[in-house]
Image (cartoon, rainbow, N blue to C red):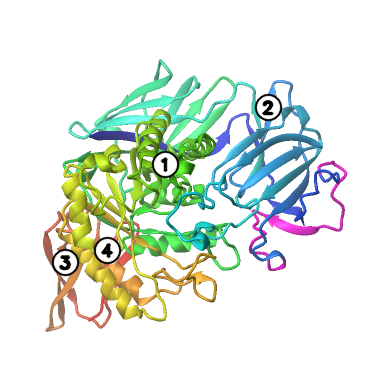
Amino acid sequence: MKRCFLLVMLMVMAGSSYAQSLNGGWLFALDPLKIGEQHGWTAPGFPDNKLDKVTVPHSYSVDKRFFFYTGAAWYFRKFDAPVIKSTDKAFINFDAVFYKCDIWFNGTRVGSHEGGYTPFTVDVTKYLQQKNTLSVRVDNSWDTTTIPGAKTWDTTYSDNASQLYPWINYGGITKPVALQIRPADYLSNIKIEAEPDLQKGTARIFIRTNGARVNLYSGDKKLAVSFKPVSGGLLANLTAKDVQLWDHDHPYLYTAEVIGSADTIRSNFGIRKIEVKNAQLLLNGHPIKMGGCNRPADYPGTGSLDPDSVLQRDLTLIKSSGMELSRIAHHAVSKNLLDWADKHGMLIITEAGNWQLTPKQMADPMIREKFKSQMKEMVERDWNHPSVIAYSLGNEFYAYKPEGLAWVRDMKQFAKTLDPTRLITFASYTVFRDYIKKPEDEASQYVDFVSANVYAKHAEWVAHIHELYPDKPVFISEFGIMATSNKTEADRIKYLKDAIAAFRKADYVIGASIWTFNDYLSRYPQTNPDGYRSWGVVGPDRQRRDSYYTLQEEFSPALIEIVSKQNGKLTVRIRSRADFPAYTLKGYKVKHGGQILNLPVMQPGDTQTLTFDAGNEPVELIKPGDFVILTQKL
């Protein structure tokens, strides 16, 4: 099965559009009795100067005054706006609000939203004035009707565990907010598709848009390429001299400028091709096998806000340890995370919020519609990121029961109507069980590649998956071991090495995503007394544990061997792994002291010997982008 992509990353709207950030100072109030609306909190004259001041993006769950409060709360913002033309439209854009919210603008209710991790927009054209009041009621409560939520109806979990989900419901306006003014005939959310020809080096680009023309840039150079109108958008063909493929080591980005009658959008994009063939995952025609991670969005003092200082540090640590192919979270991740992955090169499977829904919930039309809404918002935001290679339909639900089978069949079809260019999977915890006897017994029959959370019997269980689906690659969406009083760091290191050794013997395993990169706060049973679940290879404050360095070595695509140190010379041998991880190395370097030598292109299994002037410094393997991925001491 083949999937061919050329994707875009939407940037700042240009042309005649106007954007005004509404981040920063807001007023805030708790509403535990949910009386705010009936007591006039929606009126422009409310609030007054007795309310608390907060800075949006904001989570009241981490504010020391409201620590882990669950319930309703209000945010208020007064702001001036320019006078708009009669032909303009005005919107309030929310990147994410957790979990439910209702919005009032100048005293009028203008919208509501459910879903804590995806963006939404409210039209305020009729109500925009020179001076405005925006009032937002937020509620971070969960129950059996929320996604994620409780699952007490028909679950095998204990009544205690089934009432909870294992990360914190960080409530608030957790991502940026902005006012946007656009012309009435503004450009809609464009989507760029392409089919690069790997033999000829050319690319066919189709932009789904209502725009009239496109300017295409490679770096600062405007390309001499013409787009012609076709049904549904604009089409062009790039010649080989103008095509540079995007991949994890060479994340080359272009810019497309789409111009409408009164509006312009500029978008970064990258060209690359993903295929599933013969139980392999191919990137631009080359097989790839990589390590990865799951990263709960949780940091002391900021919760799920993911400020740039935390996000960039985390992603640098992740990239530097070879965690480059990841089912990275149980829900839609931040746009900034995907922007970083586009720019620096990571392969991401984004997942909508079905975390352990029960059969009754998956059969419930209301739950199905809520999931579709949140899936649609995620897909339409993420479909242009070159780093996003697949969509996951959920995690650890009952995939062998009729409701689970119907869920994957139907939701795959729904996702494909939104974006047919991405691969589809879900994280199964039943596919390897002994009661799954034939392919038709489990919902993995419907996906492009099998994802499985495999915590034990690694060799036995992945072999069973392969017996069921011999033509499908297997991605280990979770494996790991929690640090407890009974499990030392040495125990964890042994577990990791044994698990990865099993994956190496299975040439159909394309990736292994550790649970987890970082520790995270939780209410789930068996959480540590300090409130953290210590699954991470880094602690809450990102202090690297020994298991981090173990994964850095195990996930490195090449190893460093010290051959000799004599007569003032140091000889080292670089061996590219042939099993796991495994992919072509291009543009890699080796550093010793102040000396840096370039490696030739190395295929899996190749070796290369290098000689340096001997020093006492370690030898470092450096991947493109100057990420040090392996250090060998002398």
Q: How far apart are labels 2 and 1 at the CA level?
A: 27 Å
How dense is the environment of label 1, judged by Cα within 10 Å: few (below 14), some, or many (20 and up)?
many
Choose between 238 and 633: the one closer to the eye. Answer: 633
Residue 51 seen in the current view = yes
Q: Which residues are magenta?
A: 42-65
Front tag of 3 and 2: 2
Which residue is pictured at 54% across the width and 27% down the height?
Answer: 188
How dense is the environment of label 3, judged by Cα within 10 Å: few (below 14), some, or many (20 and up)?
some
Q: Write down the residue under mark 3.
A: 574
Q: Write down the residue under mark 4.
A: 555
Marks 2/1 in contact by CB < 8 Å: the verdict is: no
Amino acid type at circle 4 is Phe
In the rendering, which numbered label is found on residue 436? Answer: none
Secondary element at tag 2: strand
Amino acid type at circle 2 is Lys
Q: How far apart are labels 4 and 2 at the CA level?
A: 50 Å
Q: Write down the residue under mark 1.
A: 385
Q: How far apart are labels 1 and 3 at the CA level?
A: 33 Å
User: What is the x, y in percent for residue 33?
Assistant: 77, 53
Q: Write down the residue under mark 2.
A: 89
